[in-house]
């Protein structure tokens, strides 16, 4: 008898021998390399081992090497040594994690999209979410000051069971610095080419020893830009940010901790350093409406934009506010944690749509300002049993609310402004896990989350909305995860996990769209993973590896549509089925107290298995000779996702 679970496992079983063979060879190679320096390491073992890292990736504090998940963690010391002042630089040292600065270069408050294990998208919500102290942070993270970050945890694979919406590929958690009994007062700065200047001030310590602690931080950042606008000779891609952050932590008794944090940021960035290669360079798919350019894109060293007509509305002007509270009560046999966060961001971004000094384009008013107002509120209540018991459990409730007004204003008022209304998200969830020790070395855990996610758009002034100003849809989901881990030795962990990830549906809120295109359905992904974590040579080396297979359904991607006005527009739709096969490897070694080294490698074979795109069909039919494959994308790699990554 063969059920769905067996059928789903077949692709993993087919590829597993190959991946395990590669993995074993890699392990042997790295261990053999390590043995070559064992004499040095053994002779100096008394000088210490690698720093032990404690993470909270499963909502409790655990040693990184004891967590049966693929997690890459960076301490404040490692962040400083690497010069990693944003998430992008963290991604370059993390196998299986890619972070592309989207939309524009030189506007750090712009879009950003984390990609984990090849699960990418172009528009819509990201497939992996970023959290600050366990609270979701949906806005761009690029201008968040890393000087206050104590630890970064990149958790790979579906995390919906514990972290909730939009984490079906993974989660990135930033843990900020807290006050201590030791005073720390530090000023740091940077001067670099292109008028790159940054200064940070950090102070933390006790107000009342052992009872009340503070942390304050201030940052000023300025970047002059690298490229020049040929219309007026001024620099573009310039950036400016000011940040203020702080926290107060109270420990009135040994069992109660209360921490309150705040943040304020102001981004004032100039016009983006983007340029246009005009349509007369197009040399392929000439028989379809948009036409395309095939080959290596030309390198352009300047831009051409009508900046003066914007006045003081050119580029980005954004103000963001963040407030949070974390309250914990430890009763001995159990503890309770209540985390609440509030976020607000108001932004304007003025940009030249046609990116040319074209008088006709000016008359048609292709210059516009995107105005956005976003507020978010999230709250999570967690009840945890005593982690030292043979059977342990956690239960929690979660609430999330988001409101975002978005409109595009034409600068010269020669065209109609477009008001996209208010996008609304309301999410409620119950979640928890039960974990038990079968033996002293074998344990298992069952996690489950039930969520209701309501997305909608309120736009009383939109065409065809007179009788129905609010359109919305509710999605209900169950997100389970099963893990089993075995301690072969105190320094060797072998684990297996099966998890189902869930990504919320998406609303295409343009009021001129056909009603059939308003919503894209939820995505789901079933993830199978086997991994091993190893501590070698008396703690001087760690070697972690994982192989995985992901069965991904209803992937949300972009395609072209036509508005009722006749204008083309890009929308998010579901395209079918995708399959990901891959493995990850991380090695870190302490050669001496002064010298450490590490290697990271990942392979992500992420390909469409069933997908249809009408524009792709038009492309294929325009070829000579034509290819009639019905617009299938099967066999193509997912976009914006590297197949291999390596770092040293």
Image (cartoon, rainbow, N blue to C red):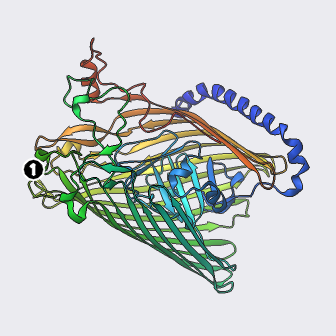
Position of residue 170 in the picture relative to residue 312 (left or right): right
Is 268 or 608 nearer to us in this picture?
268
Q: Is residue 159 left or right of residue 306?
A: right
Quarter of the picture containing the C terminus is: top right
Residue at the extreme front: 233
On the image, which quarter does residue 77 sit in? bottom right
Q: Residue at x 54, y 63 (%)?
A: 190
Residue tagged 1: 363
Q: Position of residue 30 (x, y in %)?
A: 75, 36
From what the image shows, is residue 179 above or below residue 559? below
Element assignment for label 1: helix
Seen in the picture, residue 492 relative to 346 is either above or below; the reply is: above
In terms of depth relative to the viewer, which is nearer, 33 or 470? 33
Mark 1 residue crowding within 10 angstroms, few (<14) / some (14–19) / many (20+) = few
User: Which image quarter is the N terminus in?
Assistant: top right
Outermost residue, top side: 625
Left or right: 437, with 256 as reference point: right
Q: What x and y, as percent, mark residue 287? A: 20, 22
Q: Which of 298 and 615 lies nearest the eye of the viewer?
A: 298
Rendering coords of residue 133 (x, y %) = 54, 66
- Residue 2 appears anywhere in the view: no
């Amino acid at each position: 008898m063969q059920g769905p679970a067996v059928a789903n496992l077949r692709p993993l079983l087919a590829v597993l021998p190959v991946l395990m063979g590669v993995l074993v060879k890699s392990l042997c190679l790295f261990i053999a390399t390590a043995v070559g320096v064992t004499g040095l390491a053994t002779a100096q073992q008394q000088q210490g081992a690698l720093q032990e890292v404690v993470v909270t990736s499963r909502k409790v504090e655990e040693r990184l090497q004891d967590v049966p998940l693929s997690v890459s963690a960076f301490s404040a010391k490692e962040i400083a040594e690497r010069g990693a002042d944003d998430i992008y630089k963290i991604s370059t040292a993390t196998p299986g994690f890619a972070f592309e600065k989207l939309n524009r270069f030189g506007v750090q408050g712009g879009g950003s999209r984390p990609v984990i294990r090849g699960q990418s998208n172009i528009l819509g919500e990201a497939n992996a979410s970023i959290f600050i102290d366990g609270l979701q942070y949906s806005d761009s993270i690029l201008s968040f000051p890393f000087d206050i970050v104590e630890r970064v945890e990149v958790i790979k694979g579906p995390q919906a069971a514990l972290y909730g919406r939009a984490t079906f590929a993974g989660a990135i958690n930033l843990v900020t610095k807290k006050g201590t009994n030791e005073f720390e007062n530090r000023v740091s700065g940077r001067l670099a080419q292109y008028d790159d200047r940054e200064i940070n001030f950090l102070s933390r310590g006790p107000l009342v020893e052992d009872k009340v602690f503070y942390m304050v931080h201030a940052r000023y950042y300025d970047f002059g830009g690298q490229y020049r606008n040929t219309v007026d000779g001024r620099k573009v891609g310039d950036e400016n940010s000011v940040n203020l952050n702080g926290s107060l932590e109270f420990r009135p008794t040994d069992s109660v901790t209360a921490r309150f944090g705040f943040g304020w940021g102001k981004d004032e960035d100039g016009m983006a350093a983007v340029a246009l290669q005009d349509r007369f360079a197009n040399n392929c798919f000439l028989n379809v409406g948009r036409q395309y350019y095939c080959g290596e894109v030309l390198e352009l060293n300047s831009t051409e934009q009508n900046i003066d007509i914007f006045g003081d509305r050119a580029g980005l002007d954004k103000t963001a506010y963040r407030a949070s509270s974390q309250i914990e009560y430890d009763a001995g046999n159990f503890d309770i944690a209540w985390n609440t966060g509030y976020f607000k961001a108001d932004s304007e971004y003025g940009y030249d749509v046609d990116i040319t000094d074209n008088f006709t384009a000016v008359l048609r008013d292709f210059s516009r300002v995107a105005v956005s107002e976003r507020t978010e509120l999230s709250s999570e209540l967690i009840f945890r049993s005593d982690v030292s018991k043979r059977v342990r459990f956690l239960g929690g409730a979660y609430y999330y609310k988001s409101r975002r007004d978005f409109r595009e204003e034409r600068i010269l008022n020669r065209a109609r402004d477009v008001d996209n209304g208010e996008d609304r998200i309301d999410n409620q969830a119950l979640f928890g896990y039960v974990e038990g020790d079968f033996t002293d070395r074998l344990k298992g855990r069952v996690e489950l989350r039930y969520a209701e996610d309501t997305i909608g758009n309120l736009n009383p002034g939109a065409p065809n909305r007179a009788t129905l100003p609010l359109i919305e849809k509710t999605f209900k989901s169950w997100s389970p995860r099963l893990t089993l881990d075995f301690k072969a030795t105190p320094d060797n962990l072998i684990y297996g996990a099966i998890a189902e990830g869930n990504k919320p549906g998406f609303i295409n809120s343009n009021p001129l769209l056909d009603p059939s295109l308003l919503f894209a359905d939820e995505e789901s992904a079933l993830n199978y993973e086997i991994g091993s974590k190893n501590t070698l040579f008396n703690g001087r080396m760690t070697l972690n590896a994982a192989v995985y297979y992901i069965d991904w359904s209803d992937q949300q991607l972009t395609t072209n549509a036509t508005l009722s006005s006749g204008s083309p527009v890009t929308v998010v739709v579901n395209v079918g089925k995708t399959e990901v096969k891959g493995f990850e490897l991380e090695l870190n070694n302490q050669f001496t107290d002064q010298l450490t080294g590490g290697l990271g490698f990942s392979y992500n074979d992420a390909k469409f298995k069933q997908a249809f795109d009408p524009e792709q069909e038009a492309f294929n039919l325009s070829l000579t000779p034509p290819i009639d494959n019905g617009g299938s994308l099967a066999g193509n790699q997912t976009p914006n996702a590297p197949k291999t990554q390596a770092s040293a």
